[in-house]
Amino acid sequence: MAMREECKHFQSRTYNTGDVARFCVLDLAPEAPWRCPADCARYERRLADVAWNHGSLVPPRITDPPDEPEGELASLLDQAEDIVNDAAPDVIRDYEAKPRRRGLFRRHG
């Protein structure tokens, strides 16, 4: 089963590089961006999309999943998530340490 793009919990983001992030906002798809769980208890059809026909603005199809046994794929994705989560505090600290410019518009009194 692929990601259920019609689920109200599915989201995708396309970046300037052309990369597309596809995910479940509830983090219930351990094999995202390739698969949702077949028996997901939180699946809900997005009401705004019911009976709509999508045109060419639908995000491009993602690459095929790697040839890994299902359990190994989830483990690999968990490891990748751990790497990102471990790096996050350093990234936030570096971002907050940068001086910020004040707004472009200032009141003149």
Image (cartoon, rainbow, N blue to C red):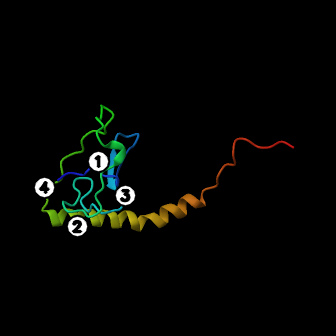
Residue identifier under label 3: 25
Residue 35's spot in the image, x, y percent? 22, 55
Work out whether residue 47 or residue 99 is closer to the camera in this orientation and state it. 47
Amino acid residing under circle 4: Asp
Cβ atoms at labels 3 and 2 below 8 Å apart: no
Residue 53's spot in the image, x, y percent? 28, 35
Residue 2's spot in the image, x, y percent? 20, 51
Q: CA distance from mark 3 to mark 2?
A: 19 Å
Res. 67 mark: 4
Q: CA distance from mark 1 to mark 4?
A: 26 Å
Cβ atoms at labels 1 and 4 below 8 Å apart: no
Label 1 sits on a secondary structure element that is: loop
- Left or right: 1 in relation to 19: left
Label 3 sits on a secondary structure element that is: loop
Res. 75 mark: 2
Label 4 sits on a secondary structure element that is: loop
Amino acid residing under circle 3: Val
Q: Is residue 90 above or below residue 60?
A: below
* Residue 38: quadrant of the picture: bottom left
Residue identifier under label 1: 6
Residue 102's spot in the image, x, y percent? 69, 48
* In front: label 3 or label 1: 1
Task: Please report whichever mark, 2 or 1, sits nearer to the chain's N-terminal start.
Answer: 1
Amino acid residing under circle 2: Ser
Task: Please report whichever mark, 2 or 4, sits nearer to the chain's N-terminal start.
Answer: 4
Q: Residue furthest top?
A: 56
